[in-house]
Image (cartoon, helix red, strand yellow):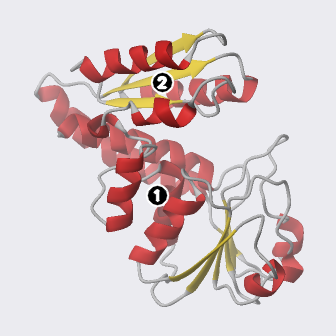
Amino acid sequence: MKPVMLDGTIVAKEIKENLKDRIAVLSERNITPCLATILVGDNPSSKTYVKMKGNACEKLGINSISIHLPAETNTEQLIRKIDELNSDPSVHGILLQHPVPDHIDERQAFEAISIEKDVDGVTSRGYGQTAFGFGNFPSCTPSAILKILNYYNLSIKGKHAVIVGRSPILGKPVSALLLNEDATVTTCHSQTENLQEILKTADIVVGAVGKPRFIKGEWLKEGAVVLDAGYNKGNIGDVDEESCLAVASAITPVPGGVGPVTIATLLEHTVLSAEK
């Protein structure tokens, strides 16, 4: 049986359509949602991501402020810029593009973002609220994964979800979100023993490991739902799509799967912040 392709562009389109009326209501109150993105240095992929986010904002009527700081910017200078944006009432969301140059303390910079403007869910306070089930702005990629599952009416409750990866802005928060939806969650990582045997028991698999085509079809349980949150050089995900297609009941493509929903979720969070 041919697996269902979980088309993220369709999900993203619906999210954006639903935002139009909310943006119009804000406009009547003379409020325009505004997202500020900070890019430090000249990482080509990061430049592309920031440009994509800016274009998505403009299409919906969301203001986009793009701040490009030189690669030699230090942690203190970056935090001063974040503090300026925290104090600006016209800015509703702040996104610090990951990764920053190695000499910057990225965690310290993330923590400087006001919880009210942490629309990308990168602060430890935001993560804690997400884990406890009352966060306004869960990390955008984990949130996108749940939106895809819900859009396609794929059951989460009682299912065994295996997350491959434990990063603080992807693996850990998606584990928390799925646990809050009554999944039984196993989080795997580079030190996990018997990874292939664990994956054989998974009803839902999330690839969040940052290794191209890492997860193989022969490791999966027949009928597993596969969500590929990886994005590697050459538009390649963390899942070996070709081999997984023979086993999975549903799978997200790369590109066109989780990515578009992540950006739409970021816009949704920015609008929600403006409403608040």
For label 2, the SS is strand
Residue 201: quarter of image: bottom right
Residue 180: quarter of image: bottom left
Which sits in the foreground, 165 or 232?
165
Q: Neighbour class for label 1 at 10 Å: few (<14), some, many (≥20)? A: many
Residue 213 in the image: x percent, y percent?
Answer: 86, 60
The residue lying at 66 percent from left, 23 percent from top is 103
- Give amino acid for label 1: Ser
- Give amino acid for label 2: Thr
Dot 2 corresponds to which residue? 37
The residue lying at 69 percent from left, 83 percent from top is 224
- Asked if labels 1 and 2 touch by Cβ distance under 8 angstroms, the answer is no
Question: Which quadrant would the N terminus be assigned to in this image?
Answer: bottom right
The residue lying at 60 percent from left, 18 percent from top is 40
Residue 151 seen by the camera: no
Dot 1 corresponds to which residue? 143
Residue 238 in the image: x percent, y percent?
Answer: 78, 58
Q: Neighbour class for label 2 at 10 Å: few (<14), some, many (≥20)? A: some
Which sits in the foreground, 4 or 51?
51
Question: Which quadrant would the C terminus be assigned to in this image?
Answer: top left
For label 1, the SS is helix
Residue 64 in the image: x percent, y percent?
Answer: 42, 21
Residue most toward the left? 29
Q: In the rendered image of this protein, does residue 82 appear above or below residue 219? A: above
- As measured in the structure, the alpha-carbon distance from the residue carrying label 2 to the one carrying label 1 is 19 Å
Which of the labelled discs sits on residue 156, or is there none?
none
